[in-house]
Each structure stands twice: as structure tokens, then as C-alpha cells.
């Protein structure tokens, strides 16, 4: 049932924050199965679960698989809710973080700037967690690039 998937997804996000990455991956796979079976392959909630799985894969250093999951999430989200939805921005932030791990600073800044532009037109409060994360990652991109020069 979709509500079961929602509860499991919330649990997966808690595990991700606590660094329990294997548990996160396992739960995300269950969530994706439930959501795909009960909703559809192209539902916005599938994009959200793919984002969480992609974030976990980035944390594990598996940027190749993370990129695929994040790009899948981006395509689904843009199709389901349009290119200016905050979830689309959240995905761009995570893609930027993935590029940071790969020391691809121009690509990181480009993705994060896309997110900031989306957040700006979304009329969200300045303390929205996604905006804060995007600004922190943008600063990290600028700082890390200076350290690599």
C-alpha cells in the first residue's frame, strides 16, 4: 500500500541521516517496489524514493549508480510536477553534491545554481532546508575548488 511505502521512506531517510547506508538502500528498494506496483513507474513518489537512494549511493561513493538514479528521479519529477517544483530543485542539489565528490566543481555549481533558481521562484521561506543545503553546497564547491588549486 502507498501509505506503507511512505512510512518506510521516512524510516529510510532517518537511516540515511544517521549513516546507516546499507539499511537505507534495502528500505529504498522495498519502497520503490511498493510505489511502482501501487502507483506507477512515473509517479512523483517514485522520484522521491530514487532521490533518497541516489543520496545514499553518493554517500557510499558509488557515483556512477547514484548518477543514474538521480537522473531517473529528475526525469520522473520534471514530467510529473514540472521543472520548477521544489523536489526538482532537491534533486539538482544532490546532483551537485555528487559532482562535488568527483571534484567536478563547475558541474556542481551549475546543478546547485539550477536548484537555487527553482527555489527562488517557488516562494519558499529562506530557512527552507533545501535552500540552506543548496547554499552550503555552493559554498563548499567554491571552498573545495580553492583548496585543489
Image (tube, helix red, strand yellow):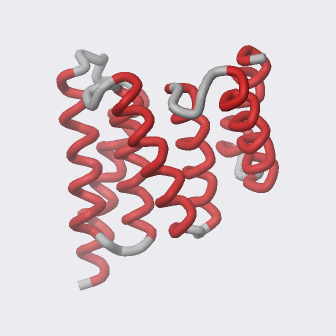
Q: Is residue 31 above or below residue 25?
A: above
* Quarter location, residue 1: top right
Spot occupied by residue 28 in the image (x, y as percentages of width and height): 71, 41
Spot occupied by residue 54 in the image (x, y as percentages of width and height): 56, 51
User: From the viewer's perspective, is 86 left or right of 101?
Assistant: left
* Quarter location, residue 88: top left
Q: Residue furthest bottom?
A: 149
* Residue in the image at 40% along x and 25% along y: 80
User: From the viewer's perspective, is 10 left or right of 42?
Assistant: right
* Residue in the image at 30% along x and 17% along y: 125
Q: Nearer the viewer, residue 104 or 34?
A: 34
Count every numbered label the image shows and give the total. 0
* Residue in the image at 24% along x and 37% along y: 116
User: From the viewer's perspective, is 72 left or right of 56?
Assistant: left
Q: Nearer the viewer, residue 71 or 113?
A: 71
Q: Is residue 71 above or below residue 52?
A: below
From the image, which quarter does the C terminus lie in? Answer: bottom left
* Residue in the image at 19% along x and 27% along y: 120
Spot occupied by residue 132 in the image (x, y as percentages of width and height): 36, 36
Amino acid at each position: 500500500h502507498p501509505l506503507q511505502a511512505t512510512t518506510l521512506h521516512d524510516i529510510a531517510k532517518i537511516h540515511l541521516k544517521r549513516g546507516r547506508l546499507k539499511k537505507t538502500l534495502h528500505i529504498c528498494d522495498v519502497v520503490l517496489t511498493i510505489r511502482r506496483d501501487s502507483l506507477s513507474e512515473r509517479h512523483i513518489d517514485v522520484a522521491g524514493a530514487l532521490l533518497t537512494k541516489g543520496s545514499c549511493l553518493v554517500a557510499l561513493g558509488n557515483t556512477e549508480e547514484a548518477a543514474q538514479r538521480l537522473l531517473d528521479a529528475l526525469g520522473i519529477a520534471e514530467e510529473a510536477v514540472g521543472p520548477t517544483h521544489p523536489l526538482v530543485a532537491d534533486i539538482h542539489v544532490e546532483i551537485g553534491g555528487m559532482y562535488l565528490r568527483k571534484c567536478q566543481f563547475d558541474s556542481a555549481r551549475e546543478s546547485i545554481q539550477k536548484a537555487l533558481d527553482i527555489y527562488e521562484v517557488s516562494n519558499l521561506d529562506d530557512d527552507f532546508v533545501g535552500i540552506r543545503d543548496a547554499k552550503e553546497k555552493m559554498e563548499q564547491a567554491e571552498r573545495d575548488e580553492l583548496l585543489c588549486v
